[in-house]
Amino acid sequence: MPQEIAGYTTRNVSTAVDMRSLYLTITEPAEHLAQLPAGVSLQMGFTHTNISTVGDLSKDTNVQTLDFEDNMHLDLSQAAFPKTLTAIKLKFCGLKAMPSTIPYGQLASLRVMFNDITTVENLDLRNATEMFFFGNPIKTISNVTLRSNVTAFDCQGCDLTTFLIDTETLHVLEQAPHFMVGSVNVSTTCALPNKPAPLKNGNMTYIVCVSPGSLLSEPKSLSDTKTSTATIVGAIIGAVVAVAIAGMLYMKCAARRSKEAMGQSTAPTVSTTTQGGASVDLSALALIRLDDRDIALSRVIAEGAYGQVWQGTYRASSVTQRGYLEKAVAIKVCLPGKTGSTAIAQLVEEILLTSQLESPCIVKTLGASWRIPSELQMVLEWMDRGDLKSVLDATTPATFSWREKAECIAAMADGLVYLHSLDIIHRDIKSRNVLLDSTKGTKLTDFGVSREATTETMTIGVGTYRWMAPEILADNHYTTAADIYSFGMVLSELTTHHIPYVDQVNDKGHALIDTAIMSRVINGSIKPTFASSCPAWIRQLGIDCIAPSPEDRPSAMKVAYIGLGDYHCNLQSGTTKKPLQE
């Protein structure tokens, strides 16, 4: 007999609480949600309850907010929701599609995050002011209608190949204070009568597909349907004449443009469009532009969800030698097939940021090179030992000594001190983004604004989420303390030579996927392993850095100059170091 959650009343909750605005969180396990409380305007959350089915919740209730979080087998196909419902959150629920039973038209807030949804279509969200879809592998957004003053539309990490909206929705999204998508390329899906059009929000421009009329199926009145035959015939004749006139004007304009184009210069300039026609401004890179003829690519050494890193050479002019000197470099480019305006703009932003950084603990950006914008290259100094993860994979605790690891830790901490002093948050500290060199030591790299936030990376054990602080996973709110948390996760890697949580298993003995790890990090039920053989100060420092509350974590300055600075001196003098004291 399945256990049910049903029949909540005010007797189930302390009467000392203001029942008009109560938020009630249910964590008791159950399989079926049958009924909601009556008589009060509750906000209710069901977290890690393992609810799989939901019944008729529409009767005798005033519940306005429903949150389902970490219910990985949730089925809403038989659900009925209250008429008072204005907000719903479905996070870590294993959804493959947008539930058809949700009354989208009455919602002010829609949050469907970290599921397996690929398509969002045919939704009337005219009353909604905020929508969050990040953490889903969404490819299609079609016939989603907005009309209210939208404050947030977040589809971060979504690589959209279909983005069909009407004109009014386009204007609403352009005015939204918070608008984020991964990338947009509708070149193969936008067909007549719909037309590509720019969606400009802030300093970003996306080419979306716009319908000439409203996508809403508004019911027509009886008088509207009684159009006379004469009116219909007249409209058809008028349309034919209009098309003929438009065709004549188009042919004349095309001929004039052709003549003008023949007289134009073909001298190369800093292009501002990609092959897809989207706007990208590369003029800001003019002062650090390198001649693309001096750059040679040899082999791919790393690849992520959005970019590739190549080993190559740069032929630079030499002061000490005659002619040119070829030196090894790393070259970062957009992933083939993902060279739209969003990806290029993000790479430009990373180049501009890193080209201004001057620290021995930050990988140096030498410049940028391009023939056309879609071939933009970020040229970086070469680090001959590769990334820290590869080094850890290729060594053992016996062959990679703590003396050498302490040097790495000190350099990482110094790099964070430098970044945080400039109010820069790295956001993606992990072993893959720490590079080593036989002479230059250890440096931080990868300051891209786009992160690997896709379902694919969440399930193959290499995604950024394993290193993320709980407040990022829960609220997407970054502070410098988030970098310190990720730094603590790298300390765990240094002790075990494995990525975090690789030793954690589920009830069936299988390795945890990232989605399961993320939910456990949020509720504080999982911690990374620190090998028992590691120095006590490392374990203590790691524990301090991964404190659940951001306020309890040490600053980069404290880590670098109070903890590691003293330990580094003790290493050189041959003494030992006591655990870090806060």
Image (spheres, rainbow, N blue to C red):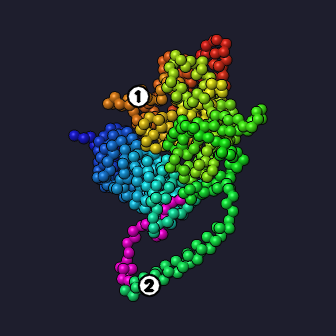
User: Residue 79 versus residue 425: which sits nearer the camera?
Assistant: 425
User: Residue 316 versus residue 378: which sits nearer the camera?
Assistant: 316
Q: Position of residue 429 (x, y in %)?
A: 56, 34
C-alpha span from label 2 to label 1? 72 Å
Q: Position of residue 478 (x, y in %)?
A: 56, 41
Residue 96 vertical placement versus 196 (above, below): above
The three-letter amino acid code for the residue at tag 2 is Ile
Residue 208 vertical placement versus 334 (above, below): below
Q: Is residue 212 magenta?
A: yes
User: Residue 542 versus residue 166: which sits nearer the camera?
Assistant: 166
Circle 2 crowding by C-alpha within 10 Å: few under 14, some 14–19, many from 20: few
Q: Is residue 161 magenta?
A: no
Most distant residue in the bottom direction: 230
- Tags 2 and 1 touching, CB below 8 Å: no
Most distant residue in the left direction: 1
Q: Tell me which residue sits at (26%, 40%) in the image.
A: 3
Query: What label does residue 504 carry, if any?
Result: 1
Q: Position of residue 81 (x, y in %)?
A: 34, 54
Circle 1 crowding by C-alpha within 10 Å: few under 14, some 14–19, many from 20: some
Looking at the image, tell me whether mark 2 or mark 1 is earlier in sequence order. Answer: 2
Question: Which segment did they paint magenta?
Answer: 207-228
Quadrant housing the C terminus: top right
The residue to which callout 2 is attached is: 237
Q: Position of residue 319 (x, y in %)?
A: 77, 35
Q: Tell me which residue sits at (35%, 53%) in the image.
A: 99
Residue 531 vertical placement versus 135 (above, below): above
Secondary structure type for disc 1: loop
Secondary structure type for disc 2: helix
